[in-house]
Image: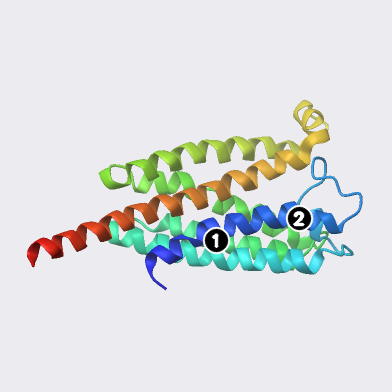
């Protein structure tokens, strides 16, 4: 599979996540996406458990494919590929969350491990800074890093259930949690599309040079 096709898997992962989280609750009478967490869709005893687990495993595979493409681009630019490895770590976390359904003790452990993958946007921006051809990708990654971190801070309210922030978020916590997932997947999809555009421009440049040479 060539590089441009693998970069498309960032968007594919985001679309699968959005469709799954949006449609699977239809299997759960009484489920409320505004107040309930994503994990509750696939918890033990849920009729959506198996499709939820399958969805997350497919997403994890897509993330791994995208991470391999990101690593190839990083190496081609002569920059650190740590952002690609962090992205790959998210694949492990996502698969673990799906396989070890809530309330399995490992479910929350894998959920917390997602904090590793959430660092990929700012790490990519930091390691690719100064590259003129990646100016848009770097700016986008900085922007999404800020959004992701704001969402992380909002989700930390669960650590203080008696605090004012949690009392404010509790009636809409399902949305608060989803904003974190959506922001990271938006970075994944956006970065993939931006890099595909760069790759296409470089391919066209090479073909044009070849035509002139002939």
Colour setup of the view: rainbow
Q: Is residue 79 visible?
A: no
The local secondary structure at tag 2 comes to helix
Q: Is residue 50 above or below residue 158?
A: below
Where residue 122 appears, as percent x and y from the top left, is: 46, 44
For label 1, the SS is helix
Percent of width and height locating residue 176: 71, 38
What residue would you read off at disc 1?
89
The residue drawn where x is 60% and y is 65% is 60
Q: Is residue 103 left or right of residue 213?
A: right
> Could you say which is closer to the camera, residue 119 or residue 73?
73
Query: Which is more N-terminal, label 2 or label 1?
Result: 2
What residue sits right under mark 2 in the picture? 23
Q: Residue furthest bottom?
A: 1
Q: Position of residue 78 (x, y in %)?
A: 27, 57
Q: Residues within 10 Å of mark 2 (few under 14, many from 20)?
A: few
**Quarter location, residue 23:** bottom right
Horizontally, residue 123 falls left or right of residue 60, namely left
- Spatial CA distance of label 1 from label 2 is 26 Å
- Residue 194, given in percent of the width and then of the height, sits at 40, 49
């Amino acid at each position: 599979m060539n590089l441009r096709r693998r970069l498309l898997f960032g968007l594919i992962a985001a679309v699968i996540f959005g469709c799954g989280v949006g449609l699977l609750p239809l299997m759960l009478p009484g489920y409320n996406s505004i107040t309930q967490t994503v994990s509750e869709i696939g918890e033990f005893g849920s009729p959506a458990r198996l499709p939820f687990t399958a969805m997350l495993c497919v997403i994890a595979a897509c993330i791994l494919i995208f991470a391999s493409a990101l690593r190839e681009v990083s190496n081609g630019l002569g920059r650190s590929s740590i952002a690609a490895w962090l992205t790959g770590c998210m694949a492990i976390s996502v698969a673990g969350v799906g396989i070890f359904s809530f309330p399995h003790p490992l479910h929350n452990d894998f959920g917390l491990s997602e904090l590793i993958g959430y660092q990929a946007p700012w790490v990519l921006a930091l390691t690719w800074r100064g590259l003129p051809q990646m100016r848009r990708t770097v700016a986008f990654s900085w922007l999404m890093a800020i959004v992701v971190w704001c969402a992380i801070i909002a989700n930390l309210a669960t650590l203080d259930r008696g605090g004012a922030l949690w009392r404010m978020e509790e009636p809409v916590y399902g949305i608060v949690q989803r904003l974190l997932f959506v922001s990271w997947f938006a970075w994944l999809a956006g970065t993939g599309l931006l890099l595909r555009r760069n790759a296409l421009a470089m391919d066209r440049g090479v073909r044009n040079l070849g035509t002139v040479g002939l």
